[in-house]
Image: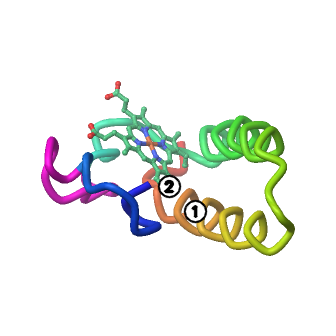
């Protein structure tokens, strides 16, 4: 929401997102990445967005998810 220019509720409550750092205590491997994206795919499908908006959102989510992987195990 905030990334896309919406309300800054997250930062107001939690500070700078620092997403990689916040995920560091959790093992995010390829399997976790795939499971996360699978559920997110279902959620995005439910939105029935216009194709261009869907493409932009999915591009962001796949890019962000890949950057969250922090272990091979
Ligand atoms: C690669 C797949 C991902 C996995 C397996 C994953 C897993 C997790 C886990 C285990 C937590 C902690 C939950 C807790 O505190 O109990 C978390 C928190 C969070 N994740 Fe992810 N995550 C993934 C990708 C992402 C992505 C791509 C985003 C944003 C685009 C994101 C945004 C967040 C946020 C905002 C939190 C809460 C941080 C906080 O304020 O404590 N995550 N995630």
Magenta part, dominant SS: helix
Location of residue 42 with respect to 5 vertically, above or below = above
Q: Is mark 1 within 8 Å of ligand 1?
A: yes
- Depth check, front residue: 8 or 56: 8
Location of residue 41 with respect to 19 vertically, above or below = above
Disc 1 residue crowd, few under 14, some 14–19, many 20+, Cα 10 Å: some
Measured Cα–Cα span from mark 2 to mark 1:
6 Å
- Depth check, front residue: 26 or 61: 61
According to the picture, the residue beneath numbered tag 1 turns out to be 66
- At 64% from the left and 48% from the top, the residue drawn is 30
- Depth check, front residue: 59 or 52: 52
- Asked if residue 14 lies in the magenta stretch, the reply is yes
Which range of residues does the magenta coloring cover?
11-21
Whether residue 34 sits left or right of residue 64 in the image: it is right
Helix, strand or loop under label 1: helix
- At 62% from the left and 46% from the top, the residue drawn is 33
Where in the image, quadrant-wise, is ligand 1 located? top left
CB under 8 Å between discs 2 and 1: yes
Q: Is mark 2 within 8 Å of ligand 1?
A: yes
According to the picture, the residue beneath numbered tag 2 turns out to be 69
């Amino acid at each position: 929401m905030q990334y896309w220019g919406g309300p800054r509720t997250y930062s107001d409550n939690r500070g700078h997102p620092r997403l990689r750092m916040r995920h560091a205590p959790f093992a995010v491997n390829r399997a976790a990445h795939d499971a996360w994206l699978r559920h997110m795919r279902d959620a995005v499908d439910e939105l029935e967005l216009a194709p261009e908006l869907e493409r932009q959102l999915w591009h962001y989510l796949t890019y962000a998810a890949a950057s969250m992987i922090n272990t091979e195990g």
